[in-house]
Amino acid sequence: MNYLQINRANTLNGNIKISGAKNAALPLIAMTILAKNRVDIKNLPHVVDIKTLLKLLSNLGASCSDFSNGSDIISISTSALHETKATYDIVRTMRASILVLGPILARFGHCEVSLPGGCAIGQRPVDLHLKALEQMGAVINIEAGYIHATAPDGLKGCQIIFDKITVTGTANIVMAAALAKGITTITNAAREPEVVQLCEILNASGVKIDGISTGVLTIHGTDGKLVDIAEFSVIPDRIEAGTYLCAGAITNSELTLENANHKHLGAVIAKLEEMGNKISFTDTTITIHPSKVQKHVKIVTQEYPGFPTDMQAQFLALTTQADGTSIIEERLFENRFMHVSELQRMGADISLSGHTATIVGGTKLSGTDVMATDLRASSALVLAGLIADGVTNVHRIYHLDRGYDSLEVKLQNVGADIKRLNE
Ligand code: EPZ
């Protein structure tokens, strides 16, 4: 198995190109199930989760152009799609496979998807997805670990109010509603930029959607007619960008991110500025400038546009270097502090009480062997390794490879001493 070996960095310097957003690309790939044409998608990130979903689509009979040849454009045709069962072997490796449920059910009237099961950061049920589909007329049975969904009379538009804001739940129902008969209103919809892009592309393809980027979406279904989807480019990955901004902050460096959209990072940039960092930006770049001291902060993770849970681990690593005691509360997931014990092994002074971490700053970290437990925890350990004395080896980086495109190469290019080695 691969691992990353990191030596303490002096300051970093240079430019990092941000890749397309994994969490935008996943629903957009699932959306091709609603298309009557071959769809060209640009700026796809080369990460494992994307390859997994493309494999799932191919298993269902879709044809996808070769994505492994280094290009970041792919074309997908689902006209020959004949299978409607997303099997356990794929779904267990990527829970976002649940995103095919809405579109397949809307198009074919039946679908079987393995229940995704929990993951390291929490139980992560899909009850809200299923309840909304039942309200639209689906009949849902759970048997032997599979979701069996049928819509004998097709899906019908209706009023849906989500008990909790769910990102992939919103995306799933938007896609189901796109082909439904009549109008669907989703209240308490997710407003993440990744959901906004999905709605924008469907709206541009003839599926009229009102309220895009608000918490109330109104989708005018096509009553089963497939849509014509023009070529589009995936938005930049705001979490990848936020991770590299934290790399700049923790190493007191000047870094410029290219192909980054600062408008998607309002809460993250505000926190970095509150900590004393100076951030400048243009339409397509974000630059973080060196700041001698990182001030302590209080962070509470929330749904967009609040502070993103996907940036919690990275800021937890950063606040170990702050000038006082920081507090981070994780409100979205029940078990998203597994990076804490690894950071403690590096010498961090962190205490946990329920969903709240208290981080005493100014601690010197020492490099050692650490283990990644989930995608964002992996990047937090890399950030800690950049400033820890000695060598840090981050193991189980298959977690990292699910969502970061060439992370070690991007960091090497700005001066980090980091390499990918084989165990
Ligand atoms: C998406 O997951 C992201 N993944 C996650 O990013 C991200 O952390 C999360 O949204 C929150 O922003 C993708 O977009 C592929 P949710 P998702 O449904 O949609 C509860 C990463 O690091 N819930 O918004 O699965 C759930 O348990 C990943 O890139 C229900 O109770 O998250 C959680 O507590 C990690 N029932 C909360 O809602 C449901 O039916 C938010 O979950 C659905 C969700």
Image (spheres, rainbow, N blue to C red):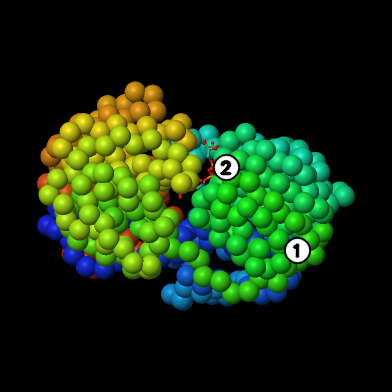
* Mark 2 neighbour density, 10 Å: few (under 14) some (14–19) many (20 or more): some
- What residue is at 80 percent from the left and 65 percent from the top? 225
- Tell me the number on the disc at residue 82: 1
Amino acid type of disc 2?
Thr
- What residue is at 26 percent from the left and 44 percent from the top? 274
Q: Is mark 1 within 8 Å of ligand 1?
A: no
- Helix, strand or loop at disc 2? loop
State whether residue 406 is above or below residue 7.
below
State whether residue 194 is above or below residue 324.
below
Q: Given this view, does label 2 or label 1 mark the residue nearer the observer?
A: 2
Residue hosting label 2: 166
Location of residue 285 (image quadrant): bottom left
State whether residue 205 is above or below residue 263.
below
For marks 2 and 1 on the same chain, the one whose residue lies earlier in the sequence: 1
- What residue is at 65 percent from the left and 42 percent from the top? 187
- Helix, strand or loop at disc 1? loop
Location of residue 133 (image quadrant): top right
- What residue is at 38 percent from the left and 24 percent from the top? 354
Q: Is mark 2 within 8 Å of ligand 1?
A: yes
